[in-house]
Amino acid sequence: MLRWKYSRQLLFSLLAFLVAIPLLPVDIFRSAGFQQTIAVALLYGALALSYDLLFGYTGLLSFGHALFFASGAYVSVILINRAGWSLWMATLGALVFTIVLALLVGSAALRTTGIAFAMVTLAFGEAGHVIINRNVGGWTNAENGLPLNADRIPSIFVGVANTHYIFWLSIAILVLTYAVVWWVTESPAGRVFAALRDNETRVSVLGLNGSRFKLLSFTVAAALASIIGVGMLIASGSAAPRYAEANTTIALLLMVILGGAISRWGAVLGGVIYSIAQTRLQDLTQSGFLDGLPKLIGGPLEEPVFILGMIFIFIVMFSPGGISGAYYRIRLRYLTNKSKTPPVKA
């Protein structure tokens, strides 16, 4: 109870600090560019957490999670621009569409296991990306993306001066995602997810239908990704084909491994760090900072993906449990040493 008490206090303190950032009398915090960058990073943290529900807690290696992220963005922007729906009704419509899509994709993909499951989800994800990128039916505007009609969304989300509202929206989406994942993983269904991850045969012996629980995890993760997709649509102002790329799902996998699977806060932290690092590395390579280095060294370093890949390799080699795993190992070592320390005699 004491541990939960202090964890809760830390969580609420961090949340209060995030909410207060745009109001602090610090120029960089009031900068629209800074708020935009952090807002996008928080959304990717939430998206990584939704993927961790699949990969970390249920043991499902999916390469098609980006499909549901993209469906949230594209379905909502189509409903807003073409059907004239309000933002909130469009969000609900995108959520329903994504849940149905997840049930169909999950029902087909979960007939297989392991690598075969990963390949089936990859096939569905790539099919969605092709449909978006080729503007099938004239709905998606192909590789140019689909801009959001700013006249049909609340004015608080329009304009540079209102970036702090987008920042607060991203916090709200992150809190919602965290709350749902916490509730699901701490529920009896969440314990079945963990059992499926560790030993699926034992679950079958107990008489439980593992496929139904896998489908539940798959659908909940997809629904969360859809809501986050709507948030990203508002933050970026358009739905882009890259949302549906397999590279997006691979990036989510790297985020989870970076932060630590089977750790809710670790997945969020991994997503935030990865997003910010990718943005800053792109700025660094475009600034000409590496121009003075030899081509053999400067060439690879000009690619942010190369630098992020090297960081990922070091994490896997020296901290297999990611950032959260390293924290828990250090904490366990500290508590172990503390328990071995002889009491001081009066």
Image: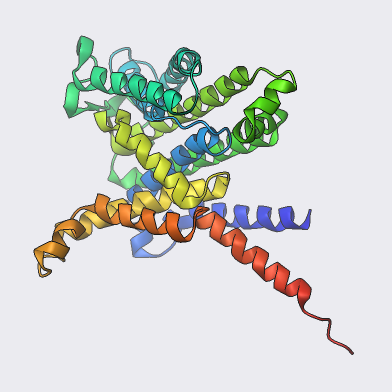
Q: Nearer the viewer, residue 12 or 189?
A: 189
Query: Residue at the location (67% across, 63% down)?
Result: 332
Q: Tell me where residue 56 appears, x and y as whole percent.
A: 54, 39
Q: Is residue 132 visible?
A: yes
Q: Tell me where residue 215 appears, x and y as whole percent.
A: 55, 20
Farthest residue to the bottom: give it: 346
Left/right of residue 206 with respect to residue 161 in the rendered view: right
Q: Give above or below for 262 relative to 135.
A: below
Q: Nearer the viewer, residue 122 or 205?
A: 205
Q: Nearer the viewer, residue 340 or 104?
A: 340
Query: Residue at the location (34% across, 63% down)?
Result: 27
Which image quadrant is residue 301 in?
bottom left
Q: Is residue 157 visible?
A: no
Query: Residue at the location (55% across, 52% down)?
Result: 15
Q: How many marks?
A: 0
Farthest residue to the top: give it: 137
Left/right of residue 153 with respect to residue 306 in the rendered view: right
